[in-house]
Image: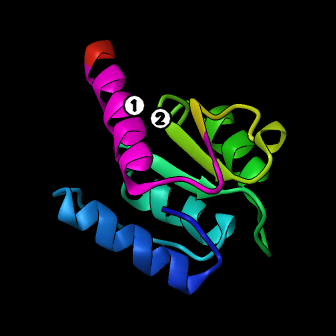
């Protein structure tokens, strides 16, 4: 997951860990891009508005690279128009149930493709 707000990263981590999902987090798109290339995740959850590198640039770079192009991406944002290229968009405010349902659907789609 990628978000520049430490409190939100903590909340997301708790939600995902309680649902038995492994979690790695980054505070911006640039550090997330490095982490994804070191160890490709099953899914990327990203905020859109962040310093250094925002979610739109992260999505664009992940989609352009053949190694990461098929990783499902969930954009969590206040403005869905910013999330071009994401597989799903969850607009703020969201609930943990909506988040987990969307993540579950994206992971199921990924499993069906393989």
Whether residue 108 appears in magenta in the rendering, the answer is: yes
Identify the residue shown where x is 47% and y is 56%: 36
Tell me: residue 16, above or below residue 64: below
Q: Which residues are magenta?
A: 90-111
On whether residue 69 falls in the magenta region, the answer is no
The residue that appears at 30% across and 61% down in the rendered structure is 16
Q: Which mark is residue 80?
A: none
Q: Quadrant of the C terminus?
A: top left
The residue lying furthest to the left in this view is 20
Q: For mark 2, give the secondary structure.
A: loop
Q: What secondary structure is found at the residue carrying circle 1?
A: helix
Q: Which residue is mark 1?
A: 106
Give the colouring mode of the picture: rainbow
Residue in the foreground of this view, choosing between 68 and 101: 101
Q: Residue furthest bottom?
A: 6
> Tag on residue 72?
2
On the image, the x and y values in percent for residue 34 come to 55, 64
* Residue at the spot 39% in from the left edge and 31% down from the top edge: 106
């Amino acid at each position: 997951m990628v978000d520049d707000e430490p409190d939100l990263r903590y909340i997301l981590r708790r939600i995902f860990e309680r649902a038995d999902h492994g979690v790695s987090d980054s505070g911006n798109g640039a550090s997330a891009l490095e982490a994804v290339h070191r160890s490709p995740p099953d899914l990327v959850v990203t905020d859109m508005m962040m310093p250094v590198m925002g979610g739109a640039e992260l999505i664009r770079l992940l989609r352009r690279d053949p190694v990461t192009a098929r990783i499902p991406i969930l954009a969590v944002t206040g403005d869905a128009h910013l999330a071009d290229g994401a597989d799903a968009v969850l607009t703020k405010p969201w609930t943990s149930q909506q988040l987990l349902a969307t993540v579950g659907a994206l992971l199921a789609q990924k499993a069906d493709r393989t």
